């Protein structure tokens, strides 16, 4: 029996985001669906809901990993909900649940997810057009454990190209529409 895994892109960012971050997040969700990857978010509001909305509207798959224990405590766009009951500790999961991680804005919770993604060797793309950690960390290294830097993107077109480049390096047993 031949099976394959659908590639996953995690979008991390603030639950309280400005209009620019929300617009970028919704467009990012649509790009992820267009590329055939599943979207993983923290399942809450702000950047997470906007990315989920964009992905779902583009017929993509949305997976939410929430900090709560209740099944119905998730944004309206999630197809799959994993309630962890872990509070902020769930950031360890969202930080490594993507084959690639996209940062849009973000505060302290997002910073913890960036650290996990970095430590677990996930490629990280940061939208430098948005305020918060994505702007501050774009083009930087978190520490010296890796040779690469966090990829900086200013536009959705740059994000699509960067995602396509990173996703195409995965095993043929993984699926994405490139």
Image (spheres, rainbow, N blue to C red):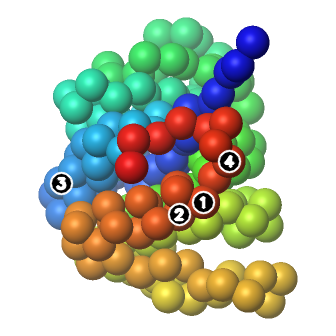
The residue that disc 2 covers is 166
Label 1 packing within 10 angstroms: few (<14), some (14-19), many (20+): few
Q: State which mark lies toward you, 1 or 3.
A: 1
**Is 68 placed above or below 143 here?**
above
Query: Which quadrant would residue 100 be assigned to in this image?
Result: bottom right
Most foreground residue, 71 or 104? 104
**Which label is found at residue 40?**
none
The mark that comes first in sequence, 2 or 4, is: 2
Asked if the residue at tag 2 contacts the one at tag 1, i.e. Cβ–Cβ closer than 8 Å, the answer is yes
Give the label, 2 or 4, closer to the camera. Answer: 4
Mark 3: give few (<14), some (14-19) or many (20+) Cα within 10 Å.
some
* Numbered label attached to residue 169: 1
Rounded to the nearest angstrom, the CA distance separating label 3 from label 4 is 32 Å
The label nearer to you, 2 versus 3, is 2
Q: Where is residue 3 in the image (x, y as percent from the top left)?
A: 68, 21
Q: Distance between the residues labelled 2 and 3?
A: 23 Å
Q: In the visual, does 134 lie left or right of 90?
A: left
Q: Which mark is residue 23?
A: 3
Q: Tell me the SS state at disc 4.
A: loop
Disc 2, disc 4: CB below 8 Å?
Answer: no
Left or right of 43 on screen, residue 119? right
Residue located at (43% from left, 61% from top): 163
Tell me which numbered mark, 1 or 3, is placed earlier along the sequence.
3
**Residue wearing tag 4:** 171
Residue at (73%, 32%) from the top-left corner? 86
Q: Between disc 3 and disc 4, whose residue precedes?
A: 3
Determine the CA span between mark 4 and mark 1: 7 Å
* Front-most of residues 21 and 55: 55
Residue at 67% from the left image edge and 36% from the top image edge = 173
């Amino acid at each position: 029996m031949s099976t394959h895994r659908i590639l996953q892109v995690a979008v991390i960012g603030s639950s309280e985001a400005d209009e620019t971050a929300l617009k970028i997040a919704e467009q990012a969700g649509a790009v992820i669906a267009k590329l055939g990857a599943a979207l993983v978010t923290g399942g809450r509001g702000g950047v997470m809901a906007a990315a989920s909305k964009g992905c779902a509207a583009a017929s993509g798959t949305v997976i939410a990993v929430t900090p709560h224990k209740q099944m119905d405590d998730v944004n309206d766009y999630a197809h799959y909900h994993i309630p962890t009951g872990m509070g902020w500790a769930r950031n360890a999961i969202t930080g490594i649940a993507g084959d690639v991680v996209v940062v849009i804005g973000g505060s302290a919770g997002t910073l913890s997810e960036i650290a996990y993604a970095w430590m677990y060797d996930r490629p990280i793309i940061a939208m430098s057009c948005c305020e918060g950690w994505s702007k501050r960390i774009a083009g930087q290294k978190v520490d010296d454990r890796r040779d690469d830097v966090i990829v900086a993107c200013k536009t959705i077109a740059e994000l699509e190209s960067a995602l396509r480049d990173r996703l195409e390096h995965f095993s043929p047993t993984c699926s994405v529409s490139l």
